[in-house]
Amino acid sequence: MIETEKKAGNQRRIESREKPAWDEDHITVRLVLNESVNAYEILINKYQAPIYNLFLRMLHNREEAEELTQDAFVRAYEALPGFRFEYRFFSWLYRIAVNLALNALKKQKRFVGSEYLNNIPDEKDEKTAENKEHMKWAVDQLKDIYKAVIVLKYYQQLSYQEVAFALNIPEKKVRSRLYDARLQLKTFLERSNYY
Amino acid sequence: MWFKKREIDRLIKAKLNGNITAEQEIKLQKILDSSKEEQIRFLQMMEMENQLKASKPPDESVNVTSEVMQKIKNTQSISSERKVLTPLLNPMIIRLAAVLIIGIFLGAAITWMVTTEKLTPGTKSLVGSMTTPANQGVSYSNQNNLIKMIPYQIGDMHYLNFVLDTRSEIKMEVSFQENDLRMIKANYIATGGNESINLYTGSLNFAATGKTSFQIIFEKLHDAPTGLSITAQQDQSQLFTKKISFEK
């Protein structure tokens, strides 16, 4: 909820930390809840790309990412009656998507048949592109919970607060989990002669 | 020292997370200046941090709008069919009905189990009047109890010999007409539990637990046929009632 103050002719917007601003997504959600189902298309068009990219970066499979993107939106639609307007719709949708991604990761076989990554690099290469691939490979070796924080923070570029909400953990835990993930990454990189 | 390493880790973590204070920054710098090893480690972490940021894969586009809307509409058509049936299939009513039906079945089953005699193979179920000439016994048994009553007659004296084997106390009641039969004696021969005999007008009660033998001696007061009834009860439930006839 946005509280406004008029002071000496100037207007300041104070955003309450507990209640986010009433944004256009909330208006769209209200429309959908009032049985304007087609209004839901607005939300799908707006957020399908970041949600799809989240799944793609977690699972490295385009077909599965597309399927899960659809699932995420369908589930979000079904859960809309329980949507709390103190949340941002996008953060709430992210939470649904992250849960789906983590569940899918558990089922997925890792290290086999990835269409997204190249083979494990054998030696350190000075070329930036190969370093990037090396880093992506190392991220893929992480445990699911560490991979999730890395992907959300660095690839999806969410804030600490948004990552915390998506994973449903305190912000402090996000920071410590991120640090642990970095330490693990460092170990993988050292073992694969990245340095 | 392990605590120093922990302190360094905490400072590097704060630096990487972007929430390091000025004081911590100075402290970190001092440590890095004093240790080559920590310097290398710190630089590796920073390089990794930069690489992580740079390794963000390019965004890809997708269009799933029509598929999602189709799935939603399919879901909606199913739920609108359900709305027609909902008044009839109100979950609360169905639950209550299910509980009622299950309860009735359970109650009937328990009642049947408790009241039905279960006879061992080869044992007849005896109901109503019967004649038990000498040398023939009457027996009742179920999973937890064995009750035998072996009658015999000598002249006008009728001996009822009870042999019981029970897991929990059984109460036996022998009812008779005082004009027809006179009780001479009633006593335990052997008992596995407490002895308890109660004599009333026209009836005798005794209790049996474990292996018990009990004898009642009646004198028949006339030549006309007469009889008595024997009832067995356990845990407030009746096991059986038998009528015994004395012809002569």
Image (spheres, rainbow, N blue to C red):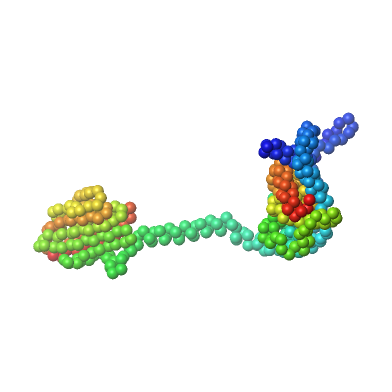
Residue sticking out furthest to the right = A9
Q: Position of residue B34 (x, y in %)?
A: 77, 36
A100 left or right of B221 in image: right
Question: Would you identify the image quadrant in which residue B218 lies?
Answer: bottom left
Q: Residue at image x 18%, y 59%? A: B160
Quarter of the image where the N terminus of chain B is located: top right
A185 left or right of B159 in image: right
Q: Nearer the viewer, residue A76 or B221?
A: A76
Q: Is residue A88 visible?
A: no
Q: Residue at image x 67%, y 60%? A: A107
Q: Nearer the viewer, residue A53 or B193?
A: A53
A144 left or right of B133 in image: right
Quarter of the image where the C terminus of chain B is located: bottom left
Q: Position of residue A149 (x, y in %)?
A: 73, 49
Q: Position of residue B29 (x, y in %)?
A: 79, 36
Residue sticking out furthest to the bottom = B122
Q: Is residue A150 above or below residue B157?
A: above
Q: Residue at image x 79%, y 36%? A: B33
Q: Position of residue B82 (x, y in %)?
A: 65, 62
